[in-house]
Amino acid sequence: MNDGGGRLRGKIAVVTGASSGIGAAIAKEFAREGAAVVIAARRADRLKEIVDAIEADDGAAFARRTDARSEADIEALFAFVDKEFGRLDLLVNSAGIADHTPTVDLSLERWRDIVDTNLTSTFLCCRAAMRRMVKQKRGRIINIGSISAKSPRPNAIAYTSTKFAMEGMTRSLALDGREHGVTVSILHPGSTVTELVPGMDEYGPEQSMNPADVAAIAALMASLPDGVNFMEALAFPIGQAFLGRG
């Protein structure tokens, strides 16, 4: 196995939303750092491509087709981890969808789809991980939030609401896990080249990050000693209109 410096050598990690974008980049980076990575998403063909890429780099990866909105699928995912490894060290919740529907046009069905995909899936995965990590008296969860939890874009009420809620969920879980040695944190990326928002690759590096940049931060957070929590990270391209006033 290529441990790539080995900051995560011997760790067992689960990464959701790992078939593309930030999730895929984090899975690859964790594998380079020595972790055995279980990748989960709905698109089995894309998961296979990620596994093949990780294995070609001498890493260890295992694909599990998973609908993160499904309680049964999540339970099956973590049961697989139990059977194969007997423990869980790291969980990254990266499953999610973006939406830019004006509030007046947003249907209840679409609202529920976004909430289930972005927020309920995170709850289901965190609950499953916490049940195992509390028993282990250690473990780390990293939720992928968004700069939209700090400064929303127009016409994104559902997406923004889920990311604000994810920050609250992270803080609550961090409190619940504290006495059990479980750390929970959140990483808020700014504009990043992913399939969530088509066209981001048309901007330069000062306007949109590469998913690998986000993955590098996630790996740093994951590599800290068990007793240290990098509670919150906010990363955005230097040119993104976030700081300052007009």
Image (tube, rainbow, N blue to C red):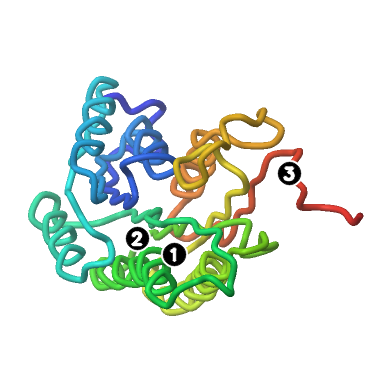
- Dot 2, crowdedness within 10 Å: few (<14), some or many (≥20)? many
User: What's the amino acid at mark 3?
Assistant: Gln
Are the residues at dot 3 and dot 2 in contact (C-beta closer than 8 Å)? no
Q: Which mark is residue 139?
A: 2
Amino acid on which the number 1 mark rests in the picture: Thr
Give the residue at the far right of this rendering: 246
Q: Which residue is the extreme one toward the left?
A: 83
Q: Amino acid at mark 2?
A: Gly
- Find out whether the residues at labels 2 and 1 contact each other: C-beta distance under 8 Å: yes
Q: Is residue 129 above or below residue 35?
A: below
* Residue pointed to by mark 1: 183
Q: Position of 72 compared to 31: left or right?
A: left
Quadrant (top left/top right/bottom left/bottom right) for the C terminus: bottom right
Q: Position of residue 200 (x, y in %)?
A: 58, 37
The residue nearer to you, when weighing 143 against 207, is 207
Q: Which residue is tagged 3?
A: 240
Residue shown at the point (28%, 28%) measured from the top left: 54
* Element carrying mark 2: strand
Please provide percent x and percent y for residue 230: 55, 57
